[in-house]
Amino acid sequence: MNELELKYGCNPSQKPAKIFMRDGSELPVKVLNGRPGYINFLDALNSWQLVKELKEATGLPSAASFKHVSPAGASVGKPLSEVDRQVYFVDKNAELSPIACAYIRARGADRLSSYGDWAALSDVCDAATARYLKNEVSDGVIAPGYTEEALAILKPKKKGGYNIVQIDPEYVPGPQETKDVFGVTFEQGHNVSKIGPELFQNIVTKNKALPPEALTDLIVALITLKYTQSNSVCYVKDGQAIGVGAGQQSRIHCTRLAGQKADNWLLRRHPRVLGLEFVEHIRRPDRDNAIDVFLSDEYEDVLAEGVWQQTFAVKPEPLTKEEKKAWIATQSGVTCGSDAFFPFGDNVERARKSGVQYIAEPGGSVRDDDVIAKADKYGMVMAFTGLRLFHH
């Protein structure tokens, strides 16, 4: 089959819609369940490229959680700690495979943004991954294969309409790619830039100590950025994206947005947040939203009298600004990647506040000296990659 009719285009009014191979060859994907739409496949194909490259670069099973053609999170499959299981609402006795851990961590980067996500897995989807996916609000999943048990778990999801896509892991696209915008065809070479350890050899700061763990995190950050709508900045810790700032017109706004998400990721681990007592049978999305609001400046929206009783079994005391700041100040060892150069040192200043110690960016700004000086001021390690990673 070299053509597949889609549910509709970007919007229900945009019909007909399809994907097809211009050269007449077979599509590299098969729909095993559901009926994906246009945006579903944009998410599926972008996210698959991310996890495939991440697995190739790190040797670890990898996963991503995509929304509107950008990752809400991405991660390699490192084991979950006890706190991870609490934060990501995983049963303490659940047996987890490496690929299940990868997806749980990817979705855990920004659970609010991952609501209704598209999941991507570098490895065969097993029962452990399917069981976690089954209980999350998700539009679909793409993987190189599925066990029979995993398919049996996922097919009934969304009243039998859950989108399950299988991709040929050996598929390689042609060297040129095209797309039409307003009746005009654009053509460019496919982005074949490789992201590996050799990319970070040009360390421009005084501190040149880049430990293996940070090197892996920088690889995760830049591969994530390669498939994130630009401008974009990504914060990573322990093989997991913890904050993605995507699609902003200003670089500093990317850095702030990613930093705010990284701060929120850390605040979810505060003992007072882990100790929140919810009413019985609260829906997972409602619980996630309540935690997000509780941690924001609008916490009164969930703590007002007559309102908190709908969410919490016991009314919690909000975290003060001072308590939040003190908790975030404990964060360290975070890496930060940028898809283009930092034009000003304010990006470094903001990244530092979220525990960033390692930075990778292309370099090439007329103010590189100022940016380097800011990194040196805080003893950071900064590598200039010479590689821009815009994605549109």
Image: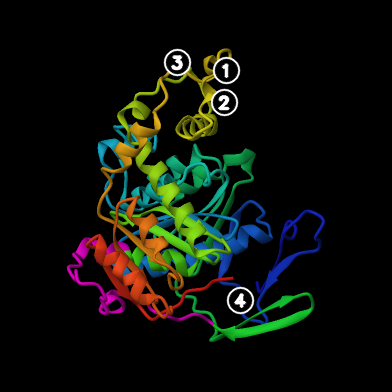
Whichever of callouts 1 and 3 sits on the residue coming sooner in the sequence is 1
Residue at 48% x, 60% y is 252
Indicate the quadrant where residue 241 lies.
Answer: bottom left
- Comparing 189 with 375, the one in front is 375
Q: Earlier in the sequence, mark 3 or mark 4?
A: 4
Spatial distance from mark 3 to mark 4, Cα to Cα? 58 Å
- Indicate which disc, 2 or 1, sits on the residue closer to the N terminus: 2
Quadrant position of the C terminus in the picture: bottom right
Amino acid carrying label 4: it is Glu
Q: In this view of the protein, can residue 122 be seen by the observer?
A: no
Read off the residue under disc 1. 307
Of callouts 2 and 4, the N-terminal one: 4
Three-letter code, disc 1: Val
What amino acid is at disc 2?
Asp
Mark-to-mark CA distance, 2 and 1:
8 Å
- In space, the residues marked 3 and 2 are separated at their CA atoms by 13 Å
Residue 256 screen position, x and y as percent: 46, 54
Badge 2 vs badge 1, beta-carbon distance below 8 Å: yes
Q: Please tell me the numbered disc located at residue 256.
A: none
**Mark 1–mark 4 distance (CA, rounded to whole Å):** 55 Å
Marks 2, 1: nearer the viewer: 2
Residue that carries the numbered disc 4 in the rendered image: 26
The image's mark for residue 315 is 3
Find disc 2 in the rendering and name its residue: 301
The mark nearer the N terminus, 3 or 2, is 2
- Measured as percent of width and height from the top left, residue 250 is found at 54, 63
> Cβ–Cβ below 8 Å for labels 3 and 2?
no
* Residue 69 in view: yes
| Region rendered in magenta | 190-217
Query: Looking at the rendering, in which quadrant would you find the N terminus?
Result: bottom right
Q: Nearer the viewer, mark 3 or mark 4?
A: 3
Residue 215 among those drawn in magenta: yes
